[in-house]
Amino acid sequence: MTTPGRGPRLVSVKDVAATAGVSLGTVSNVLNRPHRVTTQTRERVQRAMTDLGFVRNESARRLRTGVSHTMAFVMLDASNPFFTDVASGIELSVEHEGLSLMLCNSRNIAARELAHLTQLEQQRVQGILITPLDPESPTLEELAGRGTPVVIVDRHHADGRFCSVAVDDVLGGRLAIEHLIDRGHHSVAFVGGSRAVGQVAARWQGAQEAWASASLTRQRLTQLTTVDLTPADGREAGQRLAGITAHRRPTAVFCANDMIALGVLQHAVNSGIPVPEELAIVGYDDIDFAAAAAVPLSSVRRPRHILGRAAADLVLDEAANPEHRHRQLLYVPELIARASTVG
Amino acid sequence: MTTPGRGPRLVSVKDVAATAGVSLGTVSNVLNRPHRVTTQTRERVQRAMTDLGFVRNESARRLRTGVSHTMAFVMLDASNPFFTDVASGIELSVEHEGLSLMLCNSRNIAARELAHLTQLEQQRVQGILITPLDPESPTLEELAGRGTPVVIVDRHHADGRFCSVAVDDVLGGRLAIEHLIDRGHHSVAFVGGSRAVGQVAARWQGAQEAWASASLTRQRLTQLTTVDLTPADGREAGQRLAGITAHRRPTAVFCANDMIALGVLQHAVNSGIPVPEELAIVGYDDIDFAAAAAVPLSSVRRPRHILGRAAADLVLDEAANPEHRHRQLLYVPELIARASTVG
DNA sequence: TTGTACGCGTTATCAT
DNA sequence: ATGATAACGCGTACAA
């Protein structure tokens, strides 16, 4: 007869019913169909609930009704402001529907991503938004196949078997390079992370395309690989750049994201390389910190909130609408030119 | 007889038992006490589970056993890297116990905080870590009173009725100001946000104490209030500073956090005020972006990961140990001097 | 308004 | 070691 769990024994609908002197069904009606109950008894029941400290048991509800009241977003990297901004966009839509959003952080580690997905599926969340390490992973298809709506954020699935929301990163890469070519640069380095290949491949591709179509005579687009996409990686890349003698050094870099770009910027300033005169820098995402850098960073802006809202709307539709059809949305990035390229 | 919810009807233990040709109890044993089952039957059952795509129903488990497998952290502001770093510290400890962590974001809005807490309590999470808008709010005490372990992060409850983990921000404020006094500054402004009074009051207090005990003759410690603690607020504060004629302008600012400081730094550089020669800047938190600023930011470092781990350990103890006693942990900050104060 | 079957995994009991 | 069975937790929904 011991109640499992610890702490004060929790109050159930039964207790509320007893205290209010009504039946169990009436309590349920107060909770779910208040209009069916006389104002008088309703108030009596509500009184009993607050007096006893009744807390609805979401597990029991879910077990019975089969529907949970939460959505989830599995972030690739919570320390990247890009993803937290996407998350607030998601929240807006999700909470507008009276659901709550739970955030998970895979930190770019496959085992952690899997653990989160498993947990979320076991909780029977209404839907999962995810920026996956690998959009083609069978895990995602299996998950969706068992009935959990899955929407991919900031990636696409090759065969369109999911809803997805992303930005045209090929165009983004092209915008960045075209801007640098416009500013007269002939030797440019792309700085990206090897552990984040999927995230940056399109940007690199766009960069190459733009470079090729400019058909410069003595062109040179090189690649500088870092491990990850953090400010520390950027500093390290900056160090390698600073080590190159000035006349062979690229006159500009296009960084796979703003965190890298901020690191490069820092090291450049520290080692006395004037930005943008000797080194122009373009970042990617246009996070708030980009504009707040001491040399404000030119960056390819992606519509983070809109991305989040759109993704949330898709997963909500998939969860609620039986006639749902998968859609892949592609948003357009925009180059924001600031002092790091425009002297 | 219709199954509630949509999508393919989910597989239950019964189906697994039938397919594997064993009894229901055996399936349960495979899940919860695998050693009691022959390797052979265990494999047969596991085979059936994967074949059918069986997914444990966490709600049913929780309902029966009374214990959930999640902890939650309600963040004050997910766009502040300080909190995401604390969150990763928490994750480390929580996942070490085989539990999963769900993140919520109150965005400094009381209604959102309440909504999250309600939701989490209804889900019967094992414990809640929270950086509350108001540590003295009765909501928290009621929540704890009904049995959910609550640990306060980055604040303390006045009467010690909760476990809490924080940093000595009075000391932090003192360190910042002492550093500036050491560097010869006589006129300093504190830049903080009015919507974040609770978070910054101690820093301001420490700043005043240090200033008072220096007993300078022509001292001047002023206060510059912003709305929030974002880079944009910092830029706006920087604008107000730049508007002051040079000989009346403070020679240094101590910012309530690094995001503000980065904004101030940006505006200073933009308006041609040399940092640190004409304006020294000290931030607070030492987030990664502080070191990555083009003029690396001096900042009061707080042990973010350690804070998170400690908080998680406390809530885990409170959830598992019947002899748990509340503790208030206070960590010591450290001043990191960089180029924004040390020419 | 009331009574009650139901959802599903867990655990215990008794039997094989 | 495994089988068969039932009670249990708690809120929901429907028939009475």
Image (tube, coloured by chain):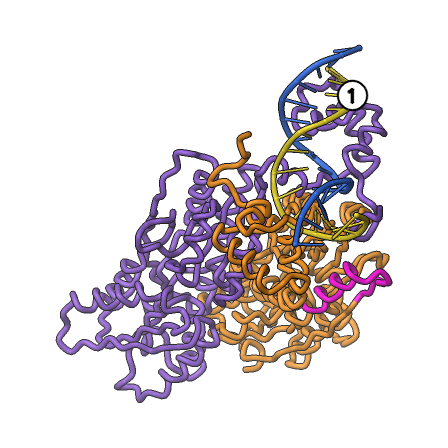
Chain colours: A orange, B purple, C blue, D yellow
User: Can residue A311 be found in the magenta stretch?
Assistant: yes
Assign a secondary structure to mark 1.
Answer: helix
Foreground pick, A248 / A304 = A304
Query: The magenta stretch spans which residues?
Result: A309-328
Density class for disc 1 (Cα within 10 Å; few <14, some 14-19, many ≥20) is some
Place of residue A96 in the rendered image (x, y in percent of width and height, measured from the top left)? 65, 68
The residue pinned by badge 1 equals B41
Q: Where is residue B90 shown, x and y percent of the image? A: 49, 47
Left or right side of B175 for A334: right
**Dominant SS in magenta:** helix
Q: Nearer the viewer, residue B75 or A60?
A: A60
| Chain identity of mark 1 | B
For the residue pair B194 and A204, the one nearer the viewer reads as B194
Position of residue B54 in the picture relative to residue A58 (left or right): right
Question: Is B156 one of the magenta-colored residues?
Answer: no
Residue B336 picture quarter: bottom left
Q: Amino acid at mark 1?
A: Thr
Q: Quadrant of the N terminus of chain A?
A: top right
Picture layout, residue D4 above or below residue B254 = above
Residue B156, located in which quarter of the rendered image?
bottom left
